[in-house]
Amino acid sequence: MKAIVVDAGEVGEVSKGAAPRRGLKRGLSVVDFLLRIVAALCTLGSALAMGTANETLPFATRFVKFRAEYKNIPTFVFFVTSNSIVCVYLVLSLALSFFHILRITAVKSRVLLAFLDTVMFGLLTTGASAAAAIVYIAHYGNANVNWFPFCQQYNSFCQRISGSVIGSFIAVVLFMILLLLSAISISKH
Amino acid sequence: MKAIVVDAGEVGEVSKGAAPRRGLKRGLSVVDFLLRIVAALCTLGSALAMGTANETLPFATRFVKFRAEYKNIPTFVFFVTSNSIVCVYLVLSLALSFFHILRITAVKSRVLLAFLDTVMFGLLTTGASAAAAIVYIAHYGNANVNWFPFCQQYNSFCQRISGSVIGSFIAVVLFMILLLLSAISISKH
């Protein structure tokens, strides 16, 4: 199973042991597939947790009802949107990932997938960290600019959105691993 | 200059035209090097613009001086930190990038660089988008949670920090291009 490379005029790298390399690449592809499923679940959970988070305080004036929803803060709307988009992308990318398990020699489609992953990684990180910045102010406020920490009232709402942001950051870390696996996999073709 | 691959038992990909491929890889490496310099300047500019931004209003009470600085908001401190770290990383990575121009067949170091790029891309995006979320509130406020838009007073401070965030996002886009170039370059070894 060894490839003999006869190279005229140029020193090429002699490929050693094609069989274990094939096994490694298939293994990487399977891990890639599984990580995508986990990351999709993380983003789905985050989007749902944020999207359904709401809390109404048990008191009201005649004109004002004290109610917190994600729609009140544009950054959270962006968070739900970006997580949803990335979740849909991850589900769709499963097809290409499965194709890579079957056709381990495919390279161009791997480069394409790595690029799309990079873009989606950027989108997800943007949404997650923007929401994290808002959640931080919601918890601690900012006395210098008189931003009040609304978590003092809306306790369960804040717990929900904090958990949601954490789920999204887990997906961010998974994306980093996915990109590393892609780079290794592409380098072994 | 053509490589003749004699493959026993396994269908390998016959490499066609090594010379143009070498040229392409060297070209990619040079573009990589130049993009890193531009991205380093962007992050340096952003860190400096944010770090030196301050505005003191032309009136004061006996106890309070109205002064805006980036240190008042923890997210902006993180923004300056992350931009500085990424700037230093980019300058250091120039060495490896230059090595790739000379040694275009190196693969493992390219995979390493791609992974480090991914991590730094994540760090930079986190800092930039967290700051963007705060700048958004600074401009428009949020009536639902009574967060006041302090840009109505601190006009020049806000222009400065907005520009700073934009510079950082330009570096984010450059990182995406860098990662795409890396993937293409690794695939052509």
Image: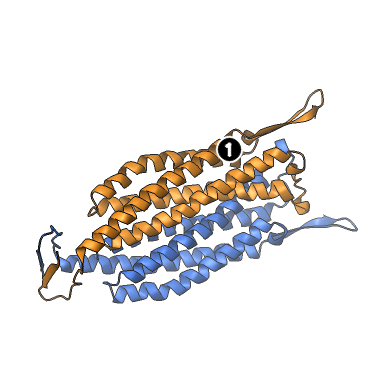
Chain colours: A orange, B blue
Q: Nearer the viewer, residue B80 or B153?
A: B80
Tag 1: residue type? Ala
Picture coordinates of residue B19, whole percent (x, y)? 17, 69
For the question of whether residue B180 can be seen, the reply is: no
Q: Note whether A137 is above or below B4 in the view shown.
A: above
Q: Which residue is mark 1?
A: A49
Q: Quadrant of residue A37?
A: top left
Question: Where the C terminus of chain B falls, by quadrant?
Answer: bottom left
User: Disc 1 sits on a residue from what chain?
Assistant: A
* Relative image position of residue B79 (x, y in whole percent): 60, 60
**Viewer-proximal residue among B114 and A158:** A158
Image quadrant holding the N terminus of chain B, namely bottom left
What residue is drawn where x is 30% and y is 52%? A110
Residue drawn 10% across the image and 60% down it: B9
Q: Secondary structure at mark 1?
A: helix
Mark 1: few, some, or many residues within 10 Å (few <14, many ≥20)? some
